[in-house]
Image (tube, rainbow, N blue to C red):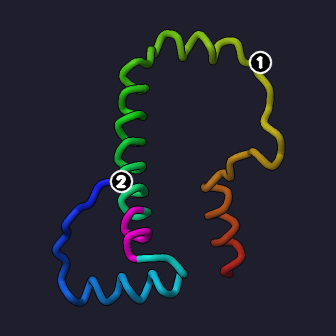
Amino acid sequence: MSALSLRLPQSLHRQLGELAEREGISINQLISSAVAEKMSALMTEDYLNARAARGSRRKFAAVLAKVADADPEPSDRMVDRTVRKRRKKAGAN
């Protein structure tokens, strides 16, 4: 473990203390968790960008070409918005 000196506005420090107490953890644990969550979000974006850069449109199309041509399950069907609009208008009269 390493130590980090951090300056916070008094109001933020007070709120941190209240939240930590409510969660039953120390302020240090709360700050460590918050930093880990933020780092995870930022690193995930980097990971996804790196994966996208390695992607190949040609290979993607080749994989899709292997998928059988079949109608979707009823629960997976997309709603036709034009039909919905017509139904709303018809019901309004």
Report the amino acid beneath label 1: Ala
Q: Earlier in the sequence, mark 2 or mark 1?
A: 2
Q: Is residue 37 above or below residue 48?
A: below
Q: Is residue 38 above or below residue 55?
A: below
Q: Which residue matches tag 1?
A: 68
Report the amino acid beneath label 2: Met
Q: Crowding near pointer 2: few (<14 within 10 Å), some, many (20+)?
A: few
**Near-viewer residue (59 or 17):** 17
- Image location of residue 24, percent across then percent down: 54, 81
The residue drawn where x is 44% and y is 14% is: 56
Which residues are the magenta region?
27-32
Q: Crowding near pointer 1: few (<14 within 10 Å), some, many (20+)?
A: few
**Near-viewer residue (55 or 23):** 23
Dot 2: element: loop
Magenta highlight on residue 57:
no
* Quarter the C terminus occupies: bottom right
